[in-house]
Amino acid sequence: MAGRERAVHTVDLAEPEGTAMQEGSTAPKRASAAETKWAGKAAPARAERRTDVQGIAAAAPVVAEASARGRKIRVLLADDHTMMREGLALLLRQEPDIEMVGEAFDGEGAVELAGRLRPDVVVMDVTMPRLNGIEATRRIVAELAGVSVIALSMHEEADMAAAMRAAGASDYVTKDSPPDVLVAAIRACAAGRGKAHIDTAPKA
């Protein structure tokens, strides 16, 4: 059992110390256009924005809120697309009040790491191997009091959002949304104010 725990908590040398990685590997999946947008553009754009005066001013209330809370928001990411997951992790690490504590590439890993790490928020891809995001969310919410789940999906259908809500997700963010929407959702869930961010209106 001790050996198993060490394997699950092995830290990738490319990741900051303290980030738990799910053990094993999966075959690479082709990223969608929405995922490529988030992974390739979100983090650099946000990094650039943080270097100007407006970015520093905008971050001030967030830092004050984190200070008042006494600690950062602990976040676990679960997504089977490596590029997407790593892009999101980079994005979230730039936020002054968010701490990335772990990454999983399937639903089983998300449930296991959530139990070990007890994050404040799990950002959960809906479609993953071994165990989908809906069932993983149901297990986490049932077993771990105080852990919120945000669904992150390419699917914009209302029934998918409803299924995640029924499983216990506090929020639903589509991968076509601006990155700031996810960051705001994480903060809202940590404060107990989760709200679905999904637009099902026909696209122009």
Image (cartoon, rainbow, N blue to C red):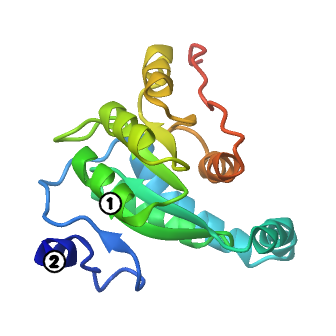
Proximity of marks 2 and 1: CB atoms separated by less than 8 Å: no
Q: What residue did someone put label 2 on?
A: 2
Q: Is residue 190 visible?
A: yes
Quadrant of the frame with the N terminus = bottom left
Whole-Å distance between the Cαs marked 2 and 1?
15 Å
Image position, residue 170 (x, y; %): 57, 36
Residue occupying image coordinates x 28% and y 56%? 112
The disc label shown at residue 113, or none: 1
Image position, residue 110 (x, y; %): 32, 52
Q: Is residue 104 left or right of residue 143?
A: left
The disc label shown at residue 164, or none: none
Q: Residues within 10 Å of mark 1 (few under 14, many from 20)?
A: many
Disc 2 marks which amino acid?
Ala
Q: Nearer the viewer, residue 66 or 30?
A: 66
Q: Is residue 200 left or right of residue 65?
A: left
Query: Relative to 193, is 26 above or below?
Result: below
Q: Is residue 88 visible?
A: no
Image position, residue 103 (x, y; %): 35, 63
Residue occupying image coordinates x 64% and y 46%? 189
